[in-house]
Amino acid sequence: MESDEGAPPEAPEHAPKRPPEHASDHPLPEPASDRTPPKPASDRTPEYIPEGSEAASPGGFFVLRTSPPPTGGDHRPLARLYAGADPAGDAPLHARVDRVAAAIGAPERRVGASVAHLGLVARLWSTALGPAVLHGRFPALDPAEVHWDPALTAPDDLWWSGTGTLPGTAAALREAVHEAHLVPLHAAFARDGRISHRLLWGNAGSALAGALRELTRWARAHGRPEAADRAAALVRDLFAHPDLAGTVRGPALRRTSCCLFYRCPSGGLCGDCVFDHAPRTGLERRPPAP
């Protein structure tokens, strides 16, 4: 029986190739659809950088705006989404799932929901883990101060109106992201429609592993091996929680389940998928790849 987990961040146009079985050489592919040309420095929206720290960062999913993006948008505090207290009810989340499902041609709503969920979870992990690793502190990310627009993609989908920061420890990351965001976010997705908690925690584990790969790749490319070591230590501690334990395996942090993205017309296997061949092709009965 196929498992019911996972998906690539956002809505990719194609599935990434299988990565090598080495954690240090297994970066999370960056979805091209979310990449935009850099703006001139004077035209950029401010992003979170701790005072006294260098500005260099991996960019992409790790960018956290500290004011609304210049493109505008209909951002709303995530706290309202989690509590079901938004004036529009759950409509913003429904709209996000609909948008993603249409973009990937999802044959089932839960496939679109999985992809939409993983995109947001990847953003939440990245905006906290990145500065925690590189600067030793990270934004407090109170759900009432993290504003989200379901119609936009990274980095314009989120902006943070807060000022408080937390120490870059596994305990602080777990409280700020896992407990304050992921637990209520999963409840919100459960209200949207039929979707298993195993799938949602599998997405959370995959997104955390993906953030680690990207940080490791960036740190080594920029001559900061100590940052790669710190990222690995923090993520190892975060995976010790029962909700995340067992969601990935091996040095490559390969998922222990599938994301269902292969069911889409243009779908395939994600780079960290549990399957070596897409189900229902007959190839899944072959021995697993080494």
Image: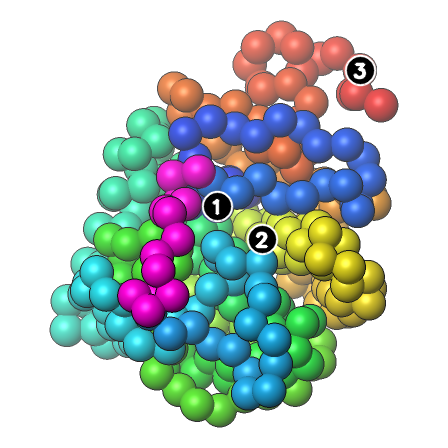
Q: Is residue 33 above or below residue 64?
A: above
Specify the label residue 9 is tagged with. Answer: 1
Q: Is 34 a magenta residue?
A: yes
**Which residue is situated farthest in the left direction here?**
87
- Are the residues at dot 1 and dot 2 in contact (C-beta closer than 8 Å)? yes
Please name which of the two marks, 3 or 2, marks the residue nearer to the observer: 2
Please name which of the two marks, 1 or 3, marks the residue nearer to the observer: 1
Amino acid at dot 3: Pro
**Which residue is situated farthest in the bottom direction here?**
164
In magenta, the rendered stretch is 32-44
Q: Secondary structure at mark 2?
A: helix
Question: Which one is in front, 77 or 187?
Answer: 77
Q: Position of residue 114 (x, y in %)?
A: 44, 45
Query: In terms of sequence position, does the residue under pointer 3 or pointer 2 come before the other?
Result: 2
Query: In terms of sequence position, does the residue under pointer 1 or pointer 2 come before the other?
Result: 1
- For the C terminus, the quadrant is top right
Q: Residue at x 58, y 53 (%)?
A: 207
Q: Is residue 154 above or below residue 277?
A: below
Query: Could you tell me how many numbered marks the image carries?
Result: 3
Specify the label residue 207 is tagged with. Answer: 2
Q: Residue at x 38, y 39 (%)?
A: 33
Specify the label residue 287 is tagged with. Answer: 3
Q: Secondary structure at mark 3?
A: loop
In 3D space, how far apart are the residues under numbered discs 1 and 3 (Cα atoms)? Answer: 28 Å
In 3D space, how far apart are the residues under numbered discs 1 and 2 (Cα atoms)? Answer: 8 Å
Q: Position of residue 142 (x, y in %)?
A: 44, 83
Is residue 265 something that shows in the picture? yes
In 3D space, how far apart are the residues under numbered discs 3 and 2 (Cα atoms)? Answer: 27 Å
